Amino acid sequence: MDTALADRLAARHHLHSQGWIARRSEHFHHLPPPALEAWIGPEPDAPACEAPALSGAGWLLQPVGPAATAGVDARWLDALDPAQRNALFADLPGPGDGEAAPFAWAHRALCRQGLRLRIHTPPGKATADCDTVWLHLHHQPRDTVEAPLLVLALEPGVRCVLIETHDRAPSACGHALVQNLHTHIHLAEGAQLQHLRLALPQAQDRMAQHVHARLAQGARYQQALVATGAAYHLQRTVVQLQGANAQARTAALLLPAGQVLEQQVHTRLDAAHTAAHTEVLALAADHERVVANAHSRIAPGAHEAQVRQRLSGVALNGQPRMVLRPHLEILHDQVQATHGATWGRLPEDALFYALQRGLDEAQARALLTEGMARAVLERAFNDDPGAQALAQWLDSGVLAQALARQLQAEVPHAA
Amino acid sequence: MTPSTPLLQVRDLRVDVGERTVLRSVHLDVAAGSLVVLMGANGSGKSTLGMALAGHPAYRVASGQALLGGTDLLGLSAHERARQGLFVSFQAPPDVPGVKNNLFIRTALNAQRQAQGQAPQDAFDFLADARESAKRLGLPESLLGRPVNEGFSGGERKRNELLQLALLRPRLALLDEIDSGLDVDGVRAVLALVQHLRAQGTAFIVVSHYLQLIEQLQPDAVLRLDQGCIAQSGGLELAREIARSGFGPKATAPSTAPTAAAHTVEA
């Protein structure tokens, strides 16, 4: 038996012996994930599914805008090949035993391919002479049950704008997709990543996407996420601010679109003068369910660390179930931390203002909804070139497409 | 509707807000191109008249009639009233988070144009008009690209109301204390815009407490609202009298009988 297969079987064995996430788990009880069997697919040596394969090609990488002056190394690796598997998982933390560890073990058990990206300053060039690297990474599923991997490393001082998209037509074989995606990001000293993420699964898909980011001294990570609901959809981001002065900002627009959606953002401030801002806007209607968790931990010795959490839910109509859970764990005295969660309707004064100017109810609600969504996402990217990237991205129809899913899923109500 | 029919006809309008009757019986005619100044003590119902005509859901019309160009305003929803040509400026214009000012106004303008069977104005033409109007009103061009009223000063909010007025070109505009928060240049901009739009047939109801502005507006009539009814009507001399003596102690409620008649204002 080769080491790749042995690794996969060992992960399966671990899962079977340790069990899956308990339905009463504190971290997942508002939206329990489907059972283990859904995530690991058939046994590695079982006959393949007889349905036609999906037509996707995994990760598709393309540069955006002007040619990059920094170096971009991309390696597509086969996780079923022992040597390539070693290279793919090299230097990544193990699955561990945290609350979401079963997802990581399931990923090890199933992962068949991955992409490693390294962005660096070419030899003989100064980092300051390199422009921001713009990349678009689109993922198309290759299997109906899959566990893709992305590993992204930015070397010291490098700046990158990454647009990552997950949207697809319904699968050709009629199967709903089950995806357990793991992304590992490492930002070296002074590196900056502005990460625009779009996750629009089909209604019957079950999707769990995990982003693990580690930031060295002075590194900056900004993430703007637009996600729509599915039969199950989890977006989980863990940011570890390991070096002094590292900063992270995440902003998410959550649109259950007739289904369910959960986001978990964990920020760990391990060093002095680190800052983490988390903002979420959930827009839901009727009987949809959406859960947003923000958990920040300020470690002992993280002097002058700053945390801000702002979770907002807007009921567009009906009585959706929105769970907004800010959480702070502070283990050092000299820090600043604020958190808040608010729940309400679209602002009535602004709605009437728009009606008085001649917009009908549907136009006014759509305009206000898009405006609120934009405002939240723009706050994650409060400087160039991120702000410019975000504006272009949002103007490209991405936001309109996501909001259309949400608004189309609503049951029509009398004005 | 004949050429002599007033643009706005309000008859025996009664408006309740919550459990309270704010307007008891208002009669008012306003001709196209004319300007009426509405004065009254705090709580007399001036803003209520605007909000009720605009169709705000908190202002419940209990009885009466309001016709704009012969169309029954009260039978229309708020946006339909706006599309009939009614513009009501807000005393405290609200923020519209994340919606850029130029997008907001262009969407409103094109909604109105479409309702009137006109082609929508394209973004470039609109922006040219908006820049020109903003310049005339002393509104920094940068505010066109910012979210509506977000972070605007009081004066900028009022100028932004004027910008919308200039671009939407309504048939009837009710300006509720448009001068408050405006500096002298802003007041001049109000006067110039009102004069320009009046010449094109827009009628105005202006709520103001300031005699200097009222005199410069050259109103066709000045009305005093008291306890939900139009208690007095006259010309500039009434505004001067109010400025000199104030609104005085609250008298017993004025008669609500139709003998109060419509306060007709012709251009």
Image (cartoon, coloured by chain):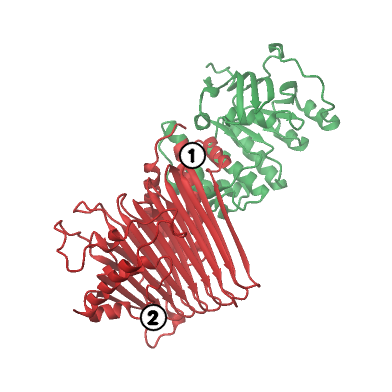
Chain colours: A red, B green
Q: Identify residue for label 2.
A: A120
Label 1 to label 2, Cα distance in Å? 50 Å
Query: Tag 1, which secondary structure?
Result: helix
Which residue lies at the image location 60% right of the left edge and 36% below the top edge?
Answer: B196
Q: Mark 1 points at which residue?
A: B109
Residue nearer the viewer, B135 or A387: A387
Q: Residue B128: in sight, yes or no?
A: no
The percent position of residue A173, horizontal first and vertical second, equals 18, 53
Which chain's residue wears label 2?
A
The residue lying at 60 percent from left, 78 percent from top is A301
In the image, B236: left or right of A167?
right
Q: Which residue lies furthest to the bottom in this view?
A: A124
Say which of A205 and A129 sits in front. Answer: A205
Q: What residue type is labelled 2?
A: His
Q: In the rendered image, which quarter is residue B45 located in?
A: top right
Q: Quadrant of residue B267?
A: top right
| Element class at badge 2 | strand
Residue sitting nearer the eye, B156 or A42: A42
**Mark 1: amino acid:** Leu
Q: Do labels 1 and 2 share a chain?
A: no
* Residue drawn at 34 percent across, 61 percent down: A165
Q: Could you tell me if residue A190 is visible in this image? A: yes
The percent coordinates of residue A212 (x first, y second) are 42, 70
